[in-house]
Image (cartoon, rainbow, N blue to C red):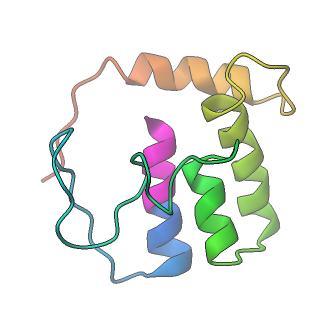
Amino acid sequence: MFYRCASIWLIDNFVDSTSTFEFIKFGSRVTKGIPFDVPGAELGRQRNISCFESIIQKYEITDSAIIRMANIIHDIDVNKWGIKITFEADSLELVFSEIRGCVCSIM
């Protein structure tokens, strides 16, 4: 799930700083805005790339740090059971799996 937050951060910082985000109930139809990270969305996981990577491709983001982040996210989100190409992927996946158990609230 952290990769979904990374995609929100990417959009807010590199695509549209005035964007707002709304989480909708699973299975609900998206009636406004641009859906992302859902089945069939242009900005989602497809053809062996993560949602984060699809945003980078669509908006032609070339920042080297973002590309590095994309490699790590790819390892965690898409290359889950394959041989990792980044050394950070396993340890970050463990950290985020522990965080996943926490309940958070944004006000």
Residue 23 at x, y percent in the picture:
21, 51
Q: Residue furthest front?
A: 40
Q: What residue appears at the point 61 percent right and 48 percent down from the top-left corner?
A: 46
Left or right: 21 as drawn, with respect to 97: left
Q: What residue appears at the point 69 percent right and 68 percent down from the top-left corner?
A: 57
Q: Nearer the viewer, residue 34 or 16?
A: 34
Residue 96 at x, y percent in the picture:
50, 26
Q: Is residue 58 above or below residue 106?
A: below
6 is within the stretch colored magenta: yes
Residue 31 at x, y percent in the picture:
17, 67
Q: Is residue 76 above or below residue 41?
A: above
What secondary structure characterizes most of the magenta part? helix
Left or right: 90 as drawn, with respect to 93: right
The magenta region covers: 1-8
Left or right: 103 as drawn, with respect to 17: left
Q: Is residue 83 above or below residue 69?
A: above
4 is within the stretch colored magenta: yes
Indicate the quadrant containing the N terminus: top left, top right, bottom left or bottom right.
top left
Determine the image quadrant of residue 33.
Answer: bottom left
- How many labels were placed on the picture? 0
Determine the image quadrant of residue 12.
Answer: bottom left
Determine the image quadrant of residue 82.
Answer: top right
Q: What residue appears at the point 44 percent right and 52 percent down from the top-left corner?
A: 40
Indicate the quadrant containing the C terminus: top left, top right, bottom left or bottom right.
bottom left
Q: What residue appears at the point 47 percent right and 19 percent down from the top-left corner?
A: 97
